[in-house]
Image (cartoon, rainbow, N blue to C red):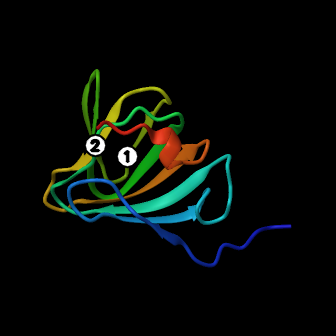
Amino acid sequence: MPTHIVKSMLIKAAGNKPKIIEEFVGLANSGTEVVSIARMRSPSGWLEPGQRPEFDEYTVVLQGALRVRTEDGVIDVEAGQAVVVARGEWVQYSTPGPKGAEYVAVCLPAFSPDTVHRDD
């Protein structure tokens, strides 16, 4: 039987500016361990600490642009584009552009504060 998720849950975001995270599926909102699906809205100038997560992250940018910094370089992901970051890879997300960004993030397995491993 399908599970109807009628409301997202707001999750506290890391970073230098307020960012809105609405988790629809995942540990916090639906108790789902295998995947998390969340809509993110980050303001211009937002920057979060680097991290080395224990999950794969698939991100689709809906509006604006998301900057993805890795040990290999920087990728600017524009609206209508996506990026995949493999588990165990160091990554830092930011939205330096004037519009910030709105995007959907899917994590396999689900995002957890215990498995994101943010930099100090």
Which residue is labeled 1 in the image? 81
Residue 113, given in percent of the width and then of the height, sits at 48, 48
Kind of residue at disc 1:
Gln
What's under tag 2, amino acid-wise?
A: Pro
x 15%, y 56%: residue: 45
Nearer the observer, 93 or 10: 10
Total marks placed: 2
Whether residue 97 is situated above or below residue 107 in the rendered picture: below
Left/right placement of residue 87 relative to residue 46 reads: right
User: Which residue sits furthest right?
Assistant: 1
User: Which structural element holds mark 2?
Assistant: loop
* Nearer mark to the viewer, of 1 and 2: 2
Picture quarter with the N terminus: bottom right
At 36% from the left edge and 59% from the top edge, which residue is drawn?
13
In the figure, is residue 62 to the left or right of 7? left
Position in image of residue 9 (x %, y %): 52, 71
Q: Say whether disc 1 or disc 2 marks the residue closer to the N-terminus.
A: 2
Question: Label 2, on which residue?
Answer: 49
Find the distance from the CA under tag 1 to the CA under tag 2.
23 Å
